[in-house]
Image (tube, rainbow, N blue to C red):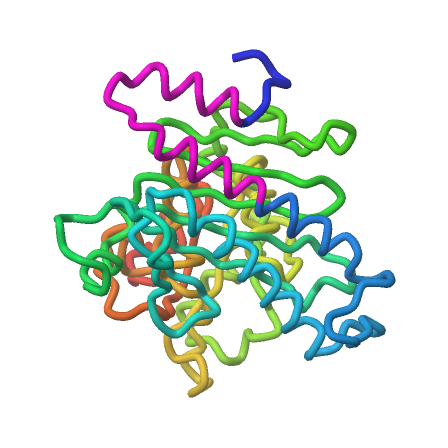
């Protein structure tokens, strides 16, 4: 495929290769790119003169951050409600399923998303992002049945993310490779920049918040010590790279290789199962990394096989290059 074609052209070309395609993904992904452009413009102004209801962004305080997150959330909901292919939506910010308004037609797909992850880093500035996942309804059930949403990650039919930083990036997969696009500001379009992304089988960096070191159990500490310990034969020590933005650290490792870790904090009762949410944060990136040749695990369980129990379920995460994640699993399971 020619570098520089628009994401819409790319999606349409893939659609033509599938006679059974209905155009649903084309419409859903096209509206998501529009929502991302709107969010990107608001994020660009976050440290300048922008405000919400008279709330100035000086210092980008908690109230302002919440308003910005709400803006991103409502932008995605408003842009996607009318496409005619969604049965409902699920957001990290909403406690329940988001219905499609009665005036709009409904479809067979479910959109799950995190509207603006890692937003507390925006005044540093560290890149922030929107993550999304698309599922297909299992049957002709009416909206409201949670079983259509609580599907394991391997059932995803598409997933992707947008990064808002020095460049505006879109990465997505429909189960047939992983492709990246960069926003060209002069024409306002996402253009193909990374086709068929393949993550290296083994990386040179690890990403983890080592400030939580003493909240981890001994096995988790051993994983981190393994990647830090010099060993010429295995290419260690690995370099530490951690921004506090899940999607940003994930994107770097997707392109260059490495492992991202957010373990459960076994000694911190507020995070007994980790911090990251299975449905709207982890499953989409796990689907992407495995389409690119990587792997995603809780340390003891393949993430894409997990049967979700509720909308905002949190899990520990080890994700990235397959050899690095497998090594973390062996240490955590006492097999090394």
Outermost residue to the top: 2
Type of secondary structure dominating the magenta stretch: helix
Q: Position of residue 261 (x, y in %)?
A: 49, 59
- Tell me the residue at 60%/68% (across/down): 210
- Tell me the residue at 33%/58% (across/down): 102
200 is within the stretch colored magenta:
no
- Tell me the residue at 78%/64% (across/down): 123
- In this rendered view, identify the residue nearer to me: 333 or 113: 113
Give the magenta part as a residue range: 8-34
Q: Quadrant of residue 18?
A: top left
- In this rendered view, identify the residue nearer to me: 9 or 328: 9
Above or below — where is 267 with respect to 173?
Answer: below
- Residue 331 seen from this side: no
What is the count of numbered marks?
A: 0
Q: Position of residue 250 (x, y in %)?
A: 54, 48
- Residue 310 seen from this side: yes
25 is within the stretch colored magenta:
yes
Q: Is residue 297 left or right of residue 181?
A: left
Q: Is residue 247 left or right of residue 279?
A: right
- Tell me the residue at 49%/21% (across/down): 10
Outermost residue to the bottom: 269
Above or below — where is 308 with respect to 303?
Answer: below
Q: Is residue 32 left or right of residue 19?
A: right
- In this rendered view, identify the residue nearer to me: 143 or 179: 143
Q: Quadrant of residue 220?
A: bottom left
Q: Position of residue 317 (x, y in %)?
A: 41, 60
Q: Quadrant of residue 255?
A: top right
Q: The C terminus lies in which quarter of the figure?
A: bottom left
Q: Position of residue 75 (x, y in %)?
A: 56, 56
């Amino acid at each position: 495929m020619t570098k520089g074609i628009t994401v819409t052209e790319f999606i349409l070309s893939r659609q033509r290769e599938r006679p059974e395609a209905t155009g649903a993904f084309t419409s859903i992904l096209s509206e998501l790119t529009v929502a991302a452009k709107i969010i990107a413009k608001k994020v660009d102004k976050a440290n300048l003169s922008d405000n919400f209801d008279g709330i100035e962004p000086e210092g980008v305080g908690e109230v302002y951050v919440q308003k910005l997150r709400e803006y991103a959330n409502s932008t995605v909901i408003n842009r996607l409600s009318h496409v005619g292919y969604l049965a409902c939506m699920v957001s990290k910010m909403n406690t329940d399923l988001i219905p499609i308004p009665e005036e709009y037609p409904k479809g067979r797909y479910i959109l799950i998303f995190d509207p603006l992850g890692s937003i507390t880093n925006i005044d540093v500035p560290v890149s922030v992002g929107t993550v999304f996942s698309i599922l297909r309804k299992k049957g002709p059930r009416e909206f409201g049945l949670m079983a259509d949403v609580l599907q394991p990650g391997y059932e995803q039919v598409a997933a992707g993310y947008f990064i808002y930083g020095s460049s505006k990036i879109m990465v997505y997969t429909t189960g047939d490779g992983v492709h990246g696009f960069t926003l060209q500001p002069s024409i306002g379009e996402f253009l193909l920049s990374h086709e068929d992304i393949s993550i290296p089988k083994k990386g040179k960096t690890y990403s983890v918040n080592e400030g939580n070191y003493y909240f981890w159990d001994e096995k988790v500490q051993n994983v981190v010590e393994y990647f830090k310990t010099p060993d010429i034969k295995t290419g260690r020590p690995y370099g530490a790279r951690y921004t506090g933005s899940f999607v940003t650290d994930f994107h770097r490792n997707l392109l260059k290789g490495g492992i991202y870790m957010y373990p459960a904090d076994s000694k911190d009762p507020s995070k007994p199962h980790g911090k990251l949410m299975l449905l709207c944060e982890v499953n989409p990136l796990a689907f992407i990394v495995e389409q690119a040749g990587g792997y995603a695990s809780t340390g003891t369980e393949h993430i894409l096989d997990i049967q979700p129990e509720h909308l905002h379920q949190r899990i520990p995460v080890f994700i990235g290059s397959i050899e690095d994640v497998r090594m973390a699993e062996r240490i955590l399971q006492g097999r090394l």
